Image (cartoon, helix red, strand yellow):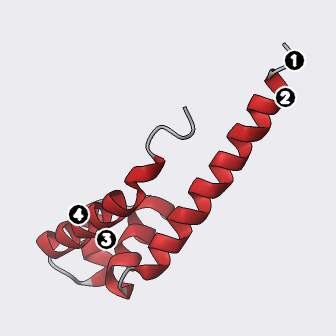
Amino acid sequence: MADAPVDTADAALDQIEVARAIQAELAKLPLDQKQMLHLAFFEGLSHSQIADRTGLALGTVKSRIRVSLKKMKSKLEIYRGVDQ
């Protein structure tokens, strides 16, 4: 039981570090890719809804989301399993 507070503190610090890394990688993305991720993940829009809102083809929306997630995944791979 004595280790629980330390483990919790370490986990909280790990989560903060991961959140900062995600924010940093988001900031590096081109504006069009960043916009797609914002609409999909922060506004909760479907790909079709994003296409309607932006006037882009559905395939373009899907490609921009896929490319941006792939970029972020490769940059953030070192954090895999940090919060587990």
Residue contact at pointers 2 and 1, CB within 8 angstroms = yes
The spot of residue 6 in percent (x, y) is: 81, 31
The spot of residue 73 in percent (x, y) is: 34, 57
State the residue position of label 2: 5
State the residue position of label 1: 2
The image quadrant where one finds the C terminus is: top right
- In this view, the residue in front, 64 or 78, is 78
Residue contact at pointers 4 and 1, CB within 8 angstroms = no
Q: Give the CA separation, mark 3 to mark 1.
A: 49 Å
State the residue position of label 4: 66
Q: Give the CA separation, mark 2 to mark 1.
A: 7 Å
Secondary structure beneath label 1: loop
The amino acid sitting under disc 1 is Ala
Which residue is painted at 20% across and 82% down in the image?
56
The spot of residue 37 in percent (x, y) is: 39, 68
For discs 2 and 4, the disc positioned in front in the rendered view: 2
Which residue is painted at 81% across and 21% down in the image?
3
Secondary structure beneath label 3: helix
The amino acid sitting under disc 3 is Ile
The image quadrant where one finds the N terminus is: top right
The spot of residue 35 in percent (x, y) is: 40, 78
The amino acid sitting under disc 2 is Pro
Secondary structure beneath label 2: helix
